[in-house]
Amino acid sequence: MRILGMLVVLWVLVTIVFLLGSVVPSEPARAYAGAGASPQVIAQKRKELGLDQPLAVRYVDYLGRLAQGDLSESVHTHKPVADDIAEALPATLELLFAAVMITVLIGLGVGVATARPRRGTGLLRGALVAGASVPVFTLGLLALFLFYYKLGWFPSGGQVSPGAATVSGPTGFLIVDSLLRGQPEVFFDVLWHLVLPATALALTPALLTARTLRSSLRFSLRQDYARTARAKGLRERDVLWRHALRNSLNAPLTICGLELGGMLAGIAVVETIFAWPGIGLYIDRSIAAGDVPAIAGVTLVTGIVFVFANAIVDLLQLAVDPRLRRLA
Amino acid sequence: MQTDANDPRSVTAAEPATEGASRPVATVRGLHLRLPGGVHALRGVDLEIEAGEIVGLVGESGSGKTMLGLSLLGLAPAGARFEGEAWLAGTEMTAADSEARRLARREHAGAVFQDPMTSLNPTMKIGTQVGEAAASREAVVEALEQVGFPEPERRLGQYPHELSGGLRQRVMIAMAIARRPALVLLDEPTTALDVTLQRTTLKLLRGLRDELGVAMLFITHDLAVAAEIADRVAVLYAGRVAELGVPSAVFRHPSHPYTAGLLASRLALAGGDRDGELATLGGEPPDPRRLPPGCPFEPRCPFSREVCSLGLPALVPSPRHPGLDACVRAAEIAPELEAGAARALALAPPPVSSAPEPAPGVAALELRHVEKTFRSRRHEQRAVSDVSLTVPEGGALALVGESGCGKTTILRIAVALERAGGGAVELGPGGRPQMVFQDAGSSLTPWMTVRQLLDERVRTEGLGAAERSRRIDETLAWVGLSQEVATMRPSRLSGGQRQRVALARAVIVPPALLACDEPTSALDVSLAAVVINLLRRLRRELGVALLFVTHDLAVARAVAEEIAVMSAGRIVERGETDRVLREPQSEETRRLLEAVPSMERTWR
């Protein structure tokens, strides 16, 4: 049922991407043929690309090529879009994964720390609200200014230091490959480069998650089962971690899943600011070049990532609350 | 994480309570409790609980029963301020720091709260939950065996929602006794259970007391339950003990007018009639922020004299039984109370039914061969099989039975909250039926004022603003609510007020049929009597027909002239209420009757 639902969502996404591609004013044939091409050349190109066919035929054709993993050719790199994305995606996934980890850590830590009334939590919460309302590009630029330009603690951008040793294969993920190949210096170099962009990406979602977790926890700590736990003589710490926390995870998990959408959008900005060689940087250049196949390909891939991540969130929610399993 | 497995203290805690020793396990002396917001919840309570003793704590809601119990466990709400002492086995819980209170709870106390569904952690396996209170896995299994939990070994990995209500409550009890505590607090442990489960639970608790020698503080609003289980009973009113003694003495010879009033507003399985008003205490408990200087019961007391408002009456030996009471006029009014109590406890002959004769032929509701099966992917559960019933116009039918017998499903089908799987549902003329739920608090939208709640309902009638406002005022007065209530939101109302608002909303546009789902089961005896009186007036004055679901036969009898007993989705017996209760034909009816707690039977 769930998998069927995911497929339907992806199909709708594919269709929208296709329709957008066919209504945008930019003329793909002209873009391929190059500026200043004669109308004959453009018409020839249109025929080659099948653009003279009716919409329905092109749609079926598009679906057929998609099924074979063919995202057609990029206008500005002149390589198959699928290859471009395959090259750029690992870096983006690394960045995303790091951002999600930071979101979970900060969300959990701050959410738990502010759940019980303590001295200073009001101030902390005020700072959090302020932090959560800063847009991601401001955050990125601020981080660069402070930690690279002023303090020099972190590099200005890129995935590895220029001229430093690097590794290639087998997975394409630098973090994984460096460990597999036994090159810890590369691993730490990548990690060092990850900190600023991942944090910039994660901060807003993390603080939203923390706020959601905090209010869920405060609700849970007032429930009858928390009173039962206290009556058993459990420490307040155990009441929170063992009893209240698991019952408070549903809403923050939902928020995390939704915020992932925000992160995917933020990736284009963050990768551009930090020169991170992922699909965000790729789509930034594609948009500038009016590269419709590339934009469509990236849109599809991010759509798949989003749907997949939310399926994981669904599974996590089932794991957390046994009562949901019966309804599933 | 079995934290305290190596804790030397747990060794002493595992020892059984000393048999026969009259050393108190809990002592409360001159205890005052003030809560933020000016609520003076406890006002000088003195109480001792001896080892192995069961003390019943009775009184209306708001009398301070739960606050007294929580104070003894050191679990009073944040911001509570104490005077006096509350000792739990060597720890003074009002002054000790939170860690000392926690250790005292851990070693010496257990607790069972009202609703086992919400009191157990829904996301933790029951074995783990009991394990947090027990020293080892063996101790978990042993505790579950002691409370009669079937196949404990196999079911340790189950979650609370996979258990029935009765089994959940057994898990709660197992958790409370797992460490062999000196004292177990039981706060309305049977109120959420049906009568048969209540009966088994009370038996189980007495058995555990005899076996383990654990003392219990048993909080209940049901006097008959207290009479059945308690060795001593304390009647609490406005944060003070009004009367204290052995239940058979206190309830047979009450010497405080409040106790007598509570007794008189109990519903009986026989006697009385359905037309008149049930005896109620009249008025409501005093506002705990503005208590009178004298006897707190004086404003409601039929025997009050000037002397009553001069000062707080002390708890002194009762003139009528070996216990204590706090009424300055106890000796003077003794004869009158005696007569009243005799009336309240008498098993009068069954009355001639004088319910309004329903007009023959016209039905407010008719169900014919109704079926309902609930399906999920794995389970298929037949909730209702072949149920046919009729509620005549202006008539009243009570549907009774144990939890899970299908009575609420029938009710929901009748008001179209649920679709019947088969058969026919026919409503008489007069539009959609209205419904009153058990938990009035959660059926009222929290951010709307009472006026808005009522206005929303009356708006559908296409009346002008002035006319609507007049209708609202009338209806509020009709259910006995003052005008100032209209501007309040549900959270500021008491339980009784909320149930009245729910009733007002249901009848502001008088329906032909009112469907009630246990509207009294969460209420005190006196409030239940108020609600029943209102329902009776509804029938008398507006000709509303009632379909009334309850597990309480006495309530069924007080409300409806006709009764249908359900079991496993079928109607097993139906007929005129008094006849069915007098001469039950089915096994199920006999079982239900047998399980009703009754002082008369307890003392026979």
Image (cartoon, grey):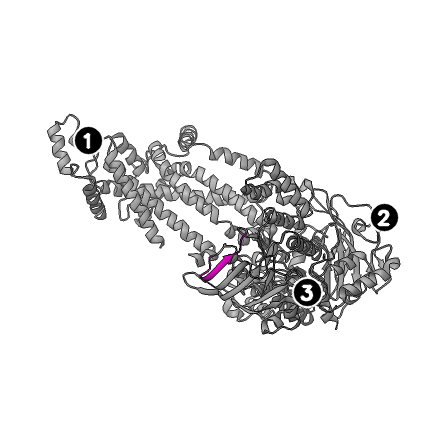
Q: Is residue A294 left or right of residue B282?
A: left
Say which amino acid is labelled 2. Answer: Gly
Q: Quadrant of the C terminus of chain A?
A: bottom left
The Cα atoms of the two marked residues, 3 and 1, are separated by 94 Å
Secondary structure of residue under mark 1: helix
Q: Is residue B134 visible?
A: no
Q: Is residue B214 left or right of residue A128?
A: right
Q: Residues within 10 Å of mark 1 (few under 14, many from 20)?
A: some
Disc number lying in front (2 or 1): 2
Q: Nearer the viewer, residue A51 or B604?
A: B604
Residue at the spot 72% in from the left edge and 42% down from the top edge: B38
Looking at the image, residue A198 lies above or below residue B315: above
Percent coordinates x, y for residue B445 in the rendering: 57, 45
Q: Nearer the viewer, residue B473 or B78?
A: B473
Instruction: Give the residue at mark 3.
Output: B353
- Residue found farthest to the front: B360
Q: Which mark is residue B310?
A: none
Percent coordinates x, y for residue B342 in the rendering: 80, 65
Instruction: Give the residue at mark 2.
Output: B311
The Cα atoms of the two marked residues, 3 and 2, are separated by 47 Å
Q: Is residue B424 magenta?
A: yes
**Quadrant in the rendering for residue B348:** bottom right
What range is drawn magenta here?
B419-429
- Residue found farthest to the top: A36
Looking at the image, residue B222 lies above or below residue A49: below
Residue at the spot 33% in from the left edge and 46% down from the top edge: A9
Looking at the image, residue B269 lies above or below residue A211: below
Instruction: Give the residue at mark 1.
Output: A31
